[in-house]
Image: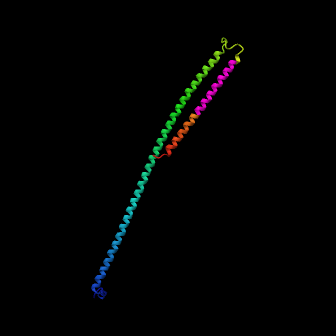
Amino acid sequence: MNPIPFLKLVPLKDWLYIGLAVLIAVAGALIVHHERELGAARAEAQLQHERAAVAQAGAKQAIDSLNETKRRTGDLLEIAHAAQESAQRAADSAAADHADRRAFGVQLDAYVRGRAVPGNPAFAAGSAPASDAALVLARLLERADARAEDLARLSDQRGNAGITCERSYDALTQKH
């Protein structure tokens, strides 16, 4: 007894065609499966490549941002140093002006008081109010000079602050 009796129903030549068709179908399925795996591997490689490119661009952007921050900080430090030097020069100048003004005041007092001595013929005994008026005028001029100096110092401070502000703005908004 033949284990597979229905094999005799189909001629051998047809079985060869059927076998060849099954072989071609299996080979085609294997090729399609292989192509899908290859496509998936290519897509994964492309994805990894794109991820690496994005990471590299992000790192470059972070480095560029860090460099720009360093440049701006350096520029601001230079500007702050220049502003401190300018403020120190202004303070030194103000101290020198104040010393000069005090010396002028002392000289003026000595001059006015020296003219009012009793032996000075320009001042008679009855002209004491004239020396008081000269002293008042001297004090008035001294106070006016002091106020003008204060206003000049304030103007210099504000001008220096404006210059510092402008330089800081330019340093922060300018791309190098």
Query: Relative to 87, is 117 on the left or the right?
Result: right
User: Which quadrant of the structure image shows residue 132?
Assistant: top right
Is 13 a magenta residue? Answer: no
User: How did the renderer colour the structure?
Assistant: rainbow
Residue at 51%, 35% (x, y): give it. 84
Residue closest to the eye, 130 or 50 = 130
Q: Residue at x 29, y 83 (%)?
A: 15
Instruction: State the image coordinates of residue 52 (x, y, percent, origin top left).
Output: 40, 57
Image coordinates for residue 33, horizontal then vertical, percent: 35, 71
Position of 173 relative to 21 (above/below): above
Number of numbered discs visible in the structure rendering = 0
Q: Is residue 118 above or below residue 11?
A: above
> Measured from the top left, where is residue 98 in percent x and y?
58, 26
**Residue most toward the top?**
119
**Quarter of the picture holding the N terminus:** bottom left
Q: Which one is nearer the viewer's eye here, 90 or 145? A: 145
Residue at screen point 54% across, 31% down: 90
The image quadrant that residue 93 belongs to is top right
Left or right of 28 on screen, residue 160: right
Q: Is residue 99 left or right of residue 56?
A: right
Per the picture, the main secondary structure of the magenta-coloured stretch is helix
**Within the magenta stretch, is there residue 138?**
yes
Q: Viewer-proximal residue, 19 or 147?
A: 147
Q: Magenta stretch?
A: 130-154
Residue occupying the point 50% across, 43% down? 170
Residue 55, image x and y in percent?
42, 55
Q: Single out the residue that lies furthest toward the right.
A: 126
